[in-house]
Amino acid sequence: MKKGRLIAKKSLGQNFIIDENFIRKLSSLISTNNNSFIIEIGPGKGALTKELIKKKVRQISVIEKDNHLIDNLEVFSKKFKNFDVIHQDALKINYNEFIEKNTIIVGNLPFNISSSLLMKWIFLEKWPPLYKKMYLMFQKEVGERILAIHGTKKYGRLSVIIQSRCKVKKLIIAKSNIFKPSPKVDGVVLEFTPHKEYLDVDINILEVIVKKAFNQRRKKIKSTLSTHIQCLNRLSIDTNLRPENLSVQQYCELSKLIK
Ligand code: SAM
């Protein structure tokens, strides 16, 4: 496979992983079986792809936007029969239709669109979704916000929305020197497992509430959520609290009452 001569495009968030040990480790943490359908977002030069095709999987589809990388990726279909390259902007795919049973979404995501992509998979129409797991790389700071629990500084909209639909686990830190070119910050790979705890919560209502609460995170909820005081009282939530003091469960309970 031709390698290495392409100049990395900043606009496409191209930071390619060059550390083979890291790639092998990451691949070993991705759990698959003979029914798995892997969707890899932004395969780039195929650093992780070449490990994924060695795993037990039924099908692998990779989605890459950069046309200069497509030919190199096509080579994998000679090594692994059920492999296809989708030359598209991953943000424009309709995942409600594309994701099948036993899907696993994998990606060293372009940092500039990582949260927007994640939101697409969290806001899927059908919940629980057809995907089983997601293994995704984020900037470390974004990862910390996703994982944050209530009562901490990093806890916010991202934490509540994502944790209302998935269990999230920190898998592995990616030091900036494992990439070429090196980004300014380290990355972290997170594992997402969809759960069914809040099936009766309308995520769009939840989103409106957390937006209201966290838009002015220094203010008490008696002012930012003033239109929902009765509901807060019904749930015995102290209205003198600030948005970071309410748990994911409390935000979900509140959303249910506001339906
Ligand atoms: N997976 C490779 C690796 O780990 O070495 C490359 C990761 S690099 C951080 C991100 C990849 O996503 C690049 O190959 C880039 O061209 C691709 N990409 C950027 N924006 C994209 C988009 N909107 N849709 C699909 N791929 C995109």
Image (cartoon, rainbow, N blue to C red):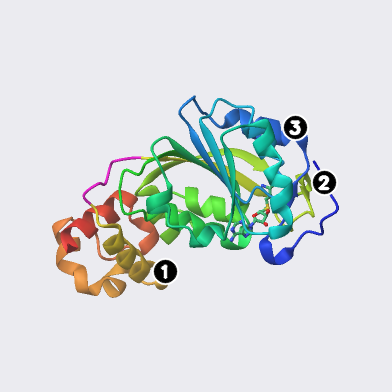
Q: Secondary structure at mark 1?
A: loop
| Residue 252 pos. (x, y %) | 27, 53
Estimate how packed mark 3 is, as few (under 14), some (14 to 19) or many (20 or more) residues with alpha carbons within 10 Å.
few
- How crowded is the residue under tag 2: few (<14 C-alpha within 10 Å), some, or many (20+)? few
Which quadrant of the view contains residue 229? bottom left
Residue carrying label 1: 217
Residue 81, image x, y percentages: 60, 32
Query: Which numbered mark, 1 or 3, is in the foreground of this view?
Result: 3
Say which amino acid is labelled 2.
Answer: Lys
Residue 59 covered by magenta stretch = no
| Magenta-drawn stretch, dominant element (helix, strand or loop) | loop
Crowd tier of the residue under label 1, counting other residues whose Cα lies within 10 Å: few below 14, some 14–19, many 20 or above: some
Which residue is painted at 36% across and 63% down in the image?
243
Q: Is residue 80 above or below residue 149?
A: above
Circle 3: residue type: Asn
Residue in view at x 62 percent, y 28 percent: 28
Closest to the observer, 198 or 23: 23
Q: Mark number for residue 3?
A: 2
Left/right of residue 185 with respect to residue 153 in the rendered view:
right
Q: Decide which of tag 1 and tag 3 comes sooner along the chain.
A: 3
